[in-house]
Image (cartoon, coloured by chain):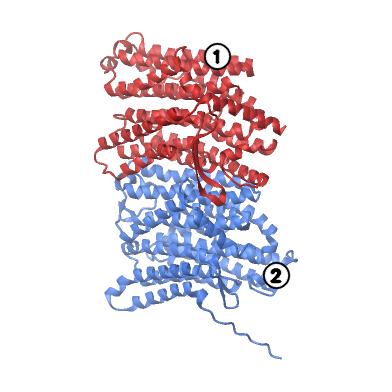
Chain colours: A red, B blue
C-alpha cells in the first residue's frame, strides 16, 4: 500500500485543491508545498525499509485490473527505481518553492498540474506492468505540456507543442512494440500478460523481431533522454519552461528515458541490447562531446545548462551500455547527480532571472561583490556539475568512465574530453558572471539570497556533498539490483545463442 | 400450382426499443399541434423520455436475442449493444438541443420528431438482418438527417449542408441499392445468412464481387470512409451543431454496425477480399482525415476531419477481424460517442458576438473566463487524442491490440503515427483555450442546465470507460460473439 500511497497522494491532494476557491493564491502555494512535503515524508520509509542486498522488487503490490487482457495493477521498486522515486519526491517541493514569486498567475492551476505531474512521474517509476507503465508514461506528458505552454517564456507554445509531438511519436511506436511483445510472449508461453517480471523471465528469441521491438522501445526512451540526434526538443522545452518546470524536466523527466533503457530495453531484449550496444555507445559519446561544445558557445545561461544536459545524459547512457557493474552503478548515480546539479543550476539561473529579467551572460559580471552567498552556492553547484572530486558528479562520471574503458578505451577517451569541456563551459560562464568588475549598473543593487532561497538550495547542496563524500548510502541500495540485471542480460543472451 | 404464401409470425418484441422511439416521435408531433403553450414545453422532455425508455427496453432485453419478420430484424446482443450506444448519443444530443435551439430561434416540434425518427432508423439499421431492411433503415435515418441538417433555414451554410448531404447521400443510396440488386441476382436472396450460405464456395463470382463492392461504397459513404468522405466537412460545418453531433455519433455508430454485420455475416466467405480492400481504405481514411484536419481553423470542420480519421481507426479494427477486432470496434464506438458528443456539446454552449463560436480563435482565453467549460473541452480533446487514462486511449488500445494480434503490424504503425499526428491539431485548440489571451469580444457561455447535464454524463462516461474498461469490453466482445463464428 505504501507505493500506492506515495504515488497517488499528490494527485489526490491536487483534486482536493481543485475544489478550493481560486481567490487566495497563497492557499495553493502552501497547499501544494504541504502535499509534496507529505509525499516526500511518505517516501522516506521506502528508503529505510528497502533492503539493498536483495535484487528483487520490493514493496510489491499486485491486483488484477483487466484480467481478460492480462493487465494488472502491479507496483514495485528495485534499487534503480528507489533512487528515482526519492529524487522525484525530493525535487518536487523544491520546484514548487522556487516558483513562489516566479509564477504570477493561475496558481491554482499551476499547483494542481504540478501535483498531477508528480503522480504521473512516480507512476512511471513504480509500474511493473507494461500497460500501466504506458498509461503513466503518456499521461504525464500532458501536465508538462501545460506547464511549459501556460507558464513558460516568450516562445512557450512552440516549445510545448514540439515537446509533446516529439515525445508522442516515440511513445506510440513503443505501444506497438508492447503489443507485439505481448502477443509473441503469449503465443510462445500460452500466458497472455503485460506483467513485466513475467515477460522478463521469458527468453525472447533473437533476431529481427527482437531487434525491431528494441528499436521501438529505444526510440521512445532515446527521445526522452535525449540521446543525440533526438535532442532538438530539449533546448526549446528547457529554456521556455518556467524554472520549476525546467527543474522537473531536467531533474526527473529526462531520467525516464535512461530508466526505460535499464528497466525495459536491457532485460527484455538482451540480444538486441548487445547488438545495438556499440551504436548507442557511439551516440552517447557524440552527445557528450556535442552537448559540451554547443554549451560552450551559448550566450544564454539557461540554454547553456540545457545543452549541458545532453552532455551529462550522454554519460548516463554510456555507463548503462558498458554493461559493466561500475558503468551501471555510475550511470544510475549520475542520473541522481544530474537531477540534483542541473536542477540546482536551473534554480540559480531562475533566481538571477527573477532579479534582473535577463539570462544573458554578457549582462552580468562581478556578482561576487554584490551577492556573495549566491555566488558561493553557485560555485558549489558548478563544481558538482563539472565533476570535482569530493562532490557528487565525480563519483558518477568516474565510475562510468571506469566501465567505459573496459568496454572501448578509444571511445572512453573521447568521452573523457567531455569532462574537460564541462570544466571549460561551466567555469568560463561562472567567471564571466561572477568574477571581475561589475559591468552593469543595474547589477549593483541586486539583493542576495532570501531565506526562502536558502531553504530550497541548502538541502540540494547537502545532498550534493553527501553523495560526493559517502556515495555508498545510495550505491549500496542499487548495486545488488544492477549486478543481477547484468547477470540476467548476459544469461539470457547466451541462452538464446 | 399455387405458391404457398407463408405469413411470418409477427413478433413485435424485437422491435420494441425502436417502436418506443417511433411512438415518442409521433407523440411529439401531436404535442406540437396542440394549441396549448404548455404542451410545447413538454416536447423536449417527452422526446428524451422516449429515448430513455428505448434505452431501458434495450437493456432489459440483453442476453435474450430475438428474430422477427423471417429474420429480417435480428435483435441480438450485437444490435442491443449498438442500440445502447445510439440511445446514449440521442439522449445526449436531445439534452444539448433544448437550450441550443431556443437560443438559435429554431425550436420546433419537427426537430425533435426528426431526431427521434433518425434514431429509430439507426436502431433498426443495427438490427437489420436483411439487405432490404438495411436499406429502409438507412433511408429512414438519412432522410431525417438531411432535413435536420437544413434546419437553420436562415443560414446559407445550413441549407448548403442539407443540399449537399441529400444529393451525395442519395447518390450513395443508389449505389447501395444497385449493390443489393446485384447481390440478389448473384445469390437469389437478400437475407444476410442466406447470402453467406449461397456464396459459399463461389465468392469469386463477378456479380457477387461487384455487388459487394457497391454495397461497400454505400456503407463507406455513411461511415465517412475515404474516398467517400467529401460530404463530411461541409455538412458537419453547416449543420446545426447538435445535428452535427448526431451525425458524428449516432449515424456513424449505426453505419459501422451495419458494415460489421454485412461483412462478418453475409460476406464471411469473402473475408480475404474485403480485408485487402479495407486495409487500403483504413490507411487512407486515417491519413486523409488527420492531414486535412491540421489545416482547419473552424472547429466544427476540424472535428469533421477528425471524425473521418476516427472512422479510419475503426476500420483498422475491422481489418483485424475476428471477435477481438469487431469487439474492439464496438467498444471504440462507445468511447467515441461519449467523447464526440461532449466536444460538440461544449460548442453548443459557447457563443461569441451573438454568433455560434466555431472558429478555433474564438476559444482564445476560454480557460480564464470559463475554467470548467475549458477543462471539459480539454478533456474531450485529450480523449480524442487518446491520452490515458481517458476512454479514447483504451478504445485505441483495443483496436491496435486486435490489429497487432492479427498480424497487421504496418497498418498499426500507420495508425499510431496518425494518432500522434492528430495530437497536433487537437492540442491547438487547447493552446488557444489555455495559452492565449482572450480577444476583445470573448466567448460567452450560455448557461444551460440540460446542456451541463449532458456534459457531465459524457465526462463521467469518458473517465469511467478509461479507468474501468474491462466490463464494457467484455460486453462488446459478448455482443460480437454471435456474428463472428
Subunit of mark 2?
Answer: B
| Alpha carbon separation for disc pair 2 and 1 | 75 Å
Circles 2, 1 touching at the beta carbon (< 8 Å): no
* Marks 2, 1 in one chain: no
Q: Quadrant of residue B319?
A: bottom right
Depth-wise, is mark 2 or mark 1 nearer the camera? Answer: 2
- The residue at the point 43 percent across, 14 percent down is A383
The N terminus of chain B lies in quadrant = bottom right
Q: Position of residue B118 (x, y in %)?
A: 46, 69
- The residue at the point 57 percent across, 68 percent down is B173
> In the picture provided, is A121 more to the left or to the right than A356?
right
Subunit of mark 1?
Answer: A
In the image, which disc is placed on residue A91?
Answer: none
The answer to which of B145 and A78 lies nearer the viewer is: A78
In the image, which disc is placed on residue A417?
Answer: 1
**Residue identifier under label 2:** B197
The answer to which of A69 and A60 lies nearer the viewer is: A60
Secondary structure type for disc 2: helix
Amino acid at each position: 500500500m505504501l507505493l500506492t500511497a506515495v504515488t497517488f497522494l499528490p494527485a489526490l491532494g491536487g483534486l482536493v485543491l481543485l475544489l478550493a476557491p481560486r481567490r487566495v493564491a497563497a492557499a495553493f502555494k502552501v497547499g501544494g508545498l504541504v502535499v509534496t512535503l507529505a509525499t516526500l515524508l511518505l517516501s522516506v520509509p521506502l528508503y529505510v525499509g528497502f533492503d539493498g542486498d536483495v535484487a528483487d522488487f520490493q514493496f510489491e503490490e499486485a491486483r488484477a485490473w483487466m484480467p481478460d487482457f492480462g493487465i494488472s495493477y502491479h507496483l514495485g521498486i528495485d534499487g534503480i527505481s528507489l533512487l528515482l522515486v526519492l529524487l522525484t519526491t525530493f525535487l518536487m517541493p523544491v520546484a514548487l518553492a522556487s516558483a513562489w514569486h516566479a509564477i504570477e498567475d493561475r496558481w491554482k492551476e499551476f499547483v494542481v498540474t504540478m501535483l498531477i505531474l508528480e503522480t504521473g512521474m512516480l507512476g512511471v517509476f513504480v509500474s511493473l506492468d507494461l500497460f500501466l507503465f504506458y498509461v503513466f508514461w503518456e499521461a504525464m506528458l500532458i501536465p508538462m505540456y501545460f506547464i511549459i505552454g501556460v507558464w513558460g517564456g516568450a516562445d512557450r507554445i512552440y516549445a510545448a507543442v514540439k515537446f509533446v509531438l516529439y515525445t508522442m511519436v516515440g511513445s506510440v511506436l513503443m505501444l506497438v512494440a508492447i503489443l507485439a511483445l505481448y502477443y509473441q510472449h503469449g503465443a510462445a508461453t500460452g500466458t497472455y500478460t503485460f506483467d513485466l517480471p513475467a515477460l522478463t523471465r521469458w527468453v525472447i528469441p533473437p533476431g529481427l523481431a527482437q531487434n525491431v521491438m528494441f528499436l521501438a522501445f529505444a526510440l521512445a526512451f532515446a527521445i526522452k533522454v535525449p540521446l543525440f540526434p533526438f535532442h532538438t526538443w530539449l533546448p526549446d522545452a528547457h529554456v521556455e519552461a518556467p524554472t520549476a518546470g525546467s527543474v522537473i524536466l531536467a531533474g526527473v523527466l529526462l531520467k525516464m528515458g535512461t530508466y526505460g533503457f535499464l528497466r525495459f530495453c536491457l532485460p527484455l531484449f538482451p540480444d538486441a541490447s548487445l547488438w545495438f550496444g556499440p551504436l548507442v555507445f557511439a551516440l552517447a559519446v557524440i552527445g557528450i562531446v556535442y552537448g559540451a561544445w554547443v554549451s560552450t558557445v551559448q550566450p544564454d545561461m539557461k540554454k547553456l545548462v540545457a545543452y549541458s544536459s545532453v552532455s551529462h545524459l550522454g554519460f548516463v547512457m554510456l555507463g548503462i551500455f558498458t554493461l559493466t557493474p561500475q558503468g551501471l552503478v555510475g550511470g544510475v548515480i549520475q542520473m541522481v547527480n544530474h537531477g540534483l546539479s542541473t536542477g540546482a543550476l536551473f534554480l540559480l539561473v531562475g533566481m538571477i532571472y527573477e532579479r534582473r529579467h535577463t539570462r544573458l551572460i554578457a549582462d552580468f559580471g562581478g556578482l561576487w561583490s554584490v551577492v556573495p552567498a549566491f555566488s558561493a552556492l553557485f560555485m558549489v553547484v558548478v563544481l558538482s556539475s563539472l565533476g570535482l572530486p569530493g562532490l557528487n558528479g565525480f563519483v558518477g562520471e568516474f565510475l562510468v568512465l571506469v566501465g567505459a574503458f573496459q568496454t572501448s578505451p578509444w571511445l572512453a577517451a573521447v568521452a573523457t574530453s567531455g569532462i574537460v569541456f564541462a570544466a571549460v563551459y561551466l567555469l568560463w560562464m561562472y567567471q564571466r558572471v561572477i568574477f571581475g568588475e561589475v559591468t552593469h549598473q543595474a547589477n549593483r543593487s541586486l539583493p542576495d539570497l532570501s531565506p526562502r532561497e536558502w531553504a530550497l538550495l541548502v538541502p540540494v547542496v547537502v545532498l550534493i556533498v553527501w553523495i560526493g563524500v559517502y556515495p555508498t548510502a545510495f550505491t549500496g541500495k542499487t548495486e545488488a539490483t544492477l549486478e543481477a540485471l547484468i547477470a540476467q542480460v548476459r544469461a539470457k543472451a547466451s541462452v538464446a545463442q | 400450382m399455387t405458391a404457398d404464401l407463408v405469413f411470418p409470425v409477427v413478433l413485435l418484441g424485437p422491435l420494441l426499443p425502436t417502436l418506443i422511439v417511433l411512438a415518442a416521435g409521433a407523440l411529439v408531433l401531436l404535442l406540437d399541434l396542440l394549441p396549448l403553450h404548455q404542451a410545447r414545453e413538454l416536447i423536449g422532455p417527452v422526446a428524451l423520455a422516449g429515448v430513455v425508455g428505448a434505452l431501458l427496453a434495450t437493456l432489459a432485453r440483453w442476453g435474450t436475442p430475438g428474430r422477427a419478420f423471417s429474420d429480417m430484424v435480428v435483435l441480438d446482443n450485437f444490435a442491443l449493444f449498438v442500440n445502447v450506444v445510439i440511445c446514449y448519443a440521442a439522449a445526449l444530443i436531445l439534452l444539448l438541443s433544448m437550450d441550443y435551439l431556443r437560443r438559435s430561434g429554431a425550436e420546433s416540434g419537427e426537430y425533435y420528431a426528426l431526431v427521434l425518427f433518425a434514431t429509430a432508423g439507426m436502431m433498426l439499421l443495427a438490427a437489420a438482418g436483411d439487405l432490404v431492411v438495411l436499406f429502409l433503415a438507412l433511408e429512414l435515418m438519412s432522410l431525417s438527417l438531411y432535413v435536420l441538417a437544413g434546419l437553420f433555414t436562415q443560414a446559407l451554410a445550413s441549407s448548403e449542408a442539407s443540399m449537399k448531404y441529400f444529393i451525395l447521400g442519395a447518390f450513395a443510396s443508389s449505389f447501395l441499392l444497385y449493390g443489393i440488386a446485384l447481390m440478389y441476382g448473384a445469390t437469389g436472396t437478400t437475407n444476410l445468412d442466406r447470402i453467406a450460405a449461397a456464396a459459399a464456395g463461389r465468392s469469386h463470382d463477378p456479380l457477387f464481387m461487384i455487388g459487394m463492392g457497391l454495397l461497400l461504397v454505400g456503407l463507406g459513404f455513411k461511415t465517412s470512409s475515404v474516398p467517400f468522405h467529401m460530404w463530411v466537412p461541409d455538412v458537419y460545418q453547416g449543420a446545426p451543431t447538435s445535428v452535427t453531433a448526431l451525425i458524428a455519433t449516432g449515424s456513424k455508430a449505426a453505419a459501422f454496425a451495419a458494415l460489421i454485420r454485412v461483412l462478418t455475416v453475409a460476406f464471411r466467405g469473402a473475408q480475404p477480399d474485403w480485408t485487402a480492400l479495407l486495409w487500403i481504405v483504413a490507411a487512407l481514411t486515417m491519413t486523409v482525415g488527420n492531414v486535412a484536419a491540421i489545416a482547419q481553423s473552424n472547429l466544427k470542420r476540424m472535428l469533421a476531419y477528425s471524425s473521418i480519421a476516427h472512422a479510419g481507426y475503426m476500420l483498422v479494427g475491422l481489418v483485424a477481424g475476428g471477435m477481438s477486432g469487431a469487439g474492439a470496434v464496438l467498444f471504440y464506438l462507445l468511447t467515441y460517442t461519449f467523447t464526440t458528443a461532449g466536444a460538440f456539446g461544449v460548442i453548443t454552449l459557447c457563443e461569441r458576438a451573438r454568433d455560434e463560436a466555431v472558429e478555433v480563435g474564438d476559444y482564445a482565453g476560454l480557460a480564464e473566463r470559463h475554467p470548467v467549460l475549458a477543462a471539459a473541452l480539454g478533456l474531450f480533446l485529450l480523449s480524442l487524442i487518446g491520452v490515458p487514462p481517458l476512454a479514447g486511449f483504451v478504445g485505441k488500445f483495443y483496436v491496435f491490440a486486435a490489429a497487432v494480434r492479427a498480424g497487421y503490424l504496418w497498418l498499426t504503425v500507420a495508425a499510431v503515427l496518425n494518432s500522434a499526428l492528430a495530437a497536433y491539431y487537437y492540442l491547438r485548440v487547447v493552446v488557444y483555450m489555455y495559452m492565449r489571451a482572450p480577444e476583445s469580444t470573448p466567448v460567452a457561455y450560455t448557461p444551460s442546465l440540460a446542456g451541463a447535464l449532458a456534459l457531465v454524463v459524457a465526462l463521467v462516461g469518458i473517465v469511467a470507460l478509461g479507468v474501468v474498461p474491462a466490463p464494457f469490453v467484455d460486453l462488446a466482445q459478448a455482443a460480437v460473439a454471435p456474428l463472428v463464428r
